[in-house]
Amino acid sequence: MDLQAAKMIGAGIACIALVGAGIGIGNVFGSYLTGALRNPGAAATQTTNLLLGFALCEATGLFGLVIALIILFT
Amino acid sequence: MAMHPMEQFEVAPAMGMEHPLFHLFGYPIYFTNQSLLMVIVVAAASLFLSLAVKPGRLVPNKTQSLAEVSYEFVANMIHSATGEDGLKFFPFVFTLFVFVLFCNFFGMVPGSFTVTSQIAVTFSLACLVMVIVIGTGFAKHGIGFLKLFVPHAPWYLLILLIPIEIISFLTRPISLSVRLFANMLAGHTMLAVFAGFVILLGGAGGALSALSILPMALIVAIMLLELLVAFLQAYVFAILTCIYLNEALHLHDQH
């Protein structure tokens, strides 16, 4: 296989990491809503943790994207 | 392709500054578009924050309350994450937050340059945070700061846990910098790709040209999302700094 084609396929495979980020972000917000609807009084105090969980989750998926970019552009 | 989506991240000498400023260890040092944007960001942030509160109105107008709200926002964030004695780090965390926020927002201006999409910039910021965290830890606890790597657990688990704790501590600057850098890079690449669609469809002629309004509308929506991400990433950068400082100040105890 030609090297350029293999690079493209590799970058595409590396982007599969974003599936995990998608599931994780959905889980973070879904769990927050479940908790917030059961106990609306405590919802406002947990927005920091919500955003923190969202950011940590998103970052792990973006590591895969960075790997894809490294494969493509080096 | 009309324009490569990664072209916007190219660091080049700023206009009119094509000659190197000086040489360091044989390498030419340029005043780049990135340096120019950083100077603009710092000037804009300091001008805005100082001019907004200069009149010192008792009842603030819109501009002054914006500056006051951002001040209180960061102060509350530090207080909730690190407790009372974390407030002495307020100037540091506030500077970091405002710098990252303004860099992200100035990057959203079409045609400008996103400073935080350069890993060199974000990694330097993350290293600065880690140096300050480690410095505070050793200054406050002396050699006892190393207890941070020893969680409360039976000794046979510690054999496994201590290396994990050390590795997780050492990867913090990487995750802190890559999070900000990758978010900005991904967002701006996506915008450029959709802008490429508009140009390609618009140039196709006939009914296809009319269709180019669809990716254009999508760009507006993504722009809004990116504005949210720009704020969120600055917030996350600042709050993670607070959390790391909290660990350095209080080790495993809660504040």
Image (cartoon, helix red, strand yellow):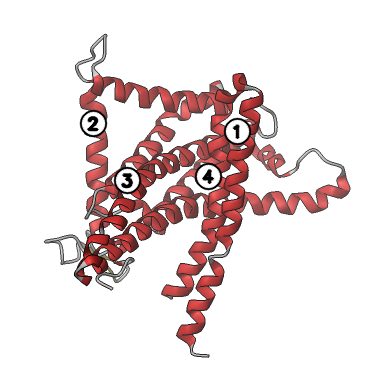
Residue B48 is labelled as: 2
Is residue A17 or residue B30 the one in the foreground?
A17
Q: Residues within 10 Å of mark 3 (few under 14, many from 20)?
A: many
Name the front one of labels 1 and 3.
1
Residue A33 is labelled as: 1
Residue A55 is labelled as: 4
Kindly identify the amino acid type of the residue bearing the numbered disc 4.
Answer: Ala
Kindly identify the amino acid type of the residue bearing the numbered disc 3.
Answer: Cys
Is residue B32 or residue B118 the one in the foreground?
B118
Q: Quadrant of the N terminus of chain B?
A: bottom left
Residue positioned 23% across, 52% down in the render: B110
Query: Marks 1/2: CA distance?
Result: 37 Å
Q: Is residue B168 above or below residue A2?
A: above
Element type at marker 4?
Answer: helix
Along the polypeptide, which appears first: circle 3 or circle 2? 2
Element type at marker 2?
Answer: helix
- In the rendered image, the residue lying farthest to the left is B16
Kindly identify the amino acid type of the residue bearing the numbered disc 1.
Answer: Leu
Query: Marks 1/3: CA distance?
Result: 32 Å
Name the front one of labels 1 and 2.
1
Residue hosting label 3: B103
Query: Marks 4/2: CA distance?
Result: 28 Å
Chain ID for label 1?
A
> Which image quadrant for residue B72?
top left
Chain ID for label 3?
B
Instruction: Determine whether label 4 and label 2 are within 8 Å by CB.
Output: no
Name the front one of labels 3 and 4.
4
Left or right: A56 as drawn, with respect to B105: right
